[in-house]
Amino acid sequence: MSNRQPPPATSSTFQITVTPLPPTTSPILPTKTITTTILGHVTTVIAQSFTDRVFITITQLSRFGVLYQASTSPSPSSHTDGSAAAPTTTAANLPPPLPTTIVTKLVGTEPTPGHVALYQLYVSQVASIVHHAMDANAGRSVVVSLALKASASADGVGKDRGRGGGQDWDDDEAGEMLMSSEDERQRFVEIMGLVQQCRVW
């Protein structure tokens, strides 16, 4: 029997080299958030810029709300047509909603049928702010999540619609009633001001 010795042990060393990523001044996904109080309600606006769309969240309920998509076709006359101007547009220095904007509800339900027109006005105005500030040929759609606290004017409309003996408005009249309310006008203007400050597009 031979006394063979085992081969000498060999050691191998694995080297791992970590290369740090270069510092960047902008996030991978451009995002901006502003929170303030409007008419006693904490209001948050979050804007995020994606390659193919801009996503804007407007909430007074600390959650996502009704989700809409606004698609706007380029139109040479759309930037100068002021016929669809929003409430107090001049005072708020807001561009008018674009007549080529199509608003589509993706998911969710408005607080009342009377809020449908009000919410669509919000989405149309947000889309106008975004498209007036970016390249006309960008062609990105705007997705808006909208969750607003019920206002005193909305409560009044709801009570009159839901109880006998009150004013019987149809949905369009209820929407006009909400949009003509001083509180709604103030909230609209202040929220749009936040959207303008959250520019990431």
Image (tube, rainbow, N blue to C red):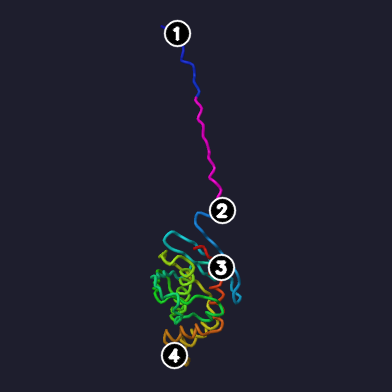
Label 4 close to label 1 by CB (< 8 Å) = no
Indicate the secondary structure of the residue bearing disc 2.
Answer: loop
Q: Where does residue 54 sit, x and y in percent of width and height?
A: 46, 64
**Camera-side mark, 4 or 2:** 2
Q: Based on the displayed image, in which of its 4 quarters is residue 74 positioned?
A: bottom left
**Camera-side mark, 2 or 1:** 2
In the rendered structure, the answer to whether residue 78 lies left or right of residue 40 reads left
**Camera-side mark, 4 or 1:** 4
Please give the name of the residue rendered at 49% of the width and 62% of the height, measured from the top-left corner.
Answer: 48
- Reading the chain from its start, which is encountered first: label 2 or label 1? 1
Magenta extent? 12-25
Indicate the secondary structure of the residue bearing disc 3.
Answer: helix
> Tag 2: Cα neighbours inside 10 Å, few (<14), some, or many (≥20)?
few
Viewer-nearest residue: 138 or 23: 138
Q: Which residue is mark 2?
A: 25
> Tag 1: Cα neighbours inside 10 Å, few (<14), some, or many (≥20)?
few
Predominant secondary structure, magenta span: loop
Indicate the secondary structure of the residue bearing disc 4.
Answer: loop
- Reading the chain from its start, which is encountered first: label 3 or label 1? 1
Is residue 136 shown in magenta?
no
Is residue 17 shown in magenta?
yes
Q: Where does residue 49 sit, x and y in percent of width and height?
A: 48, 61
Q: How far separated are the C-alphas under marks 2 and 1?
A: 68 Å
Q: How far separated are the C-alphas under marks 3 and 4?
A: 40 Å
- Reading the chain from its start, which is encountered first: label 3 or label 4? 4
In the rendered structure, the answer to whether residue 41 lies left or right of residue 11 reads right
Indicate the secondary structure of the residue bearing disc 1.
Answer: loop
Q: Which residue is mark 3?
A: 197
Q: Which residue is mark 4?
A: 168
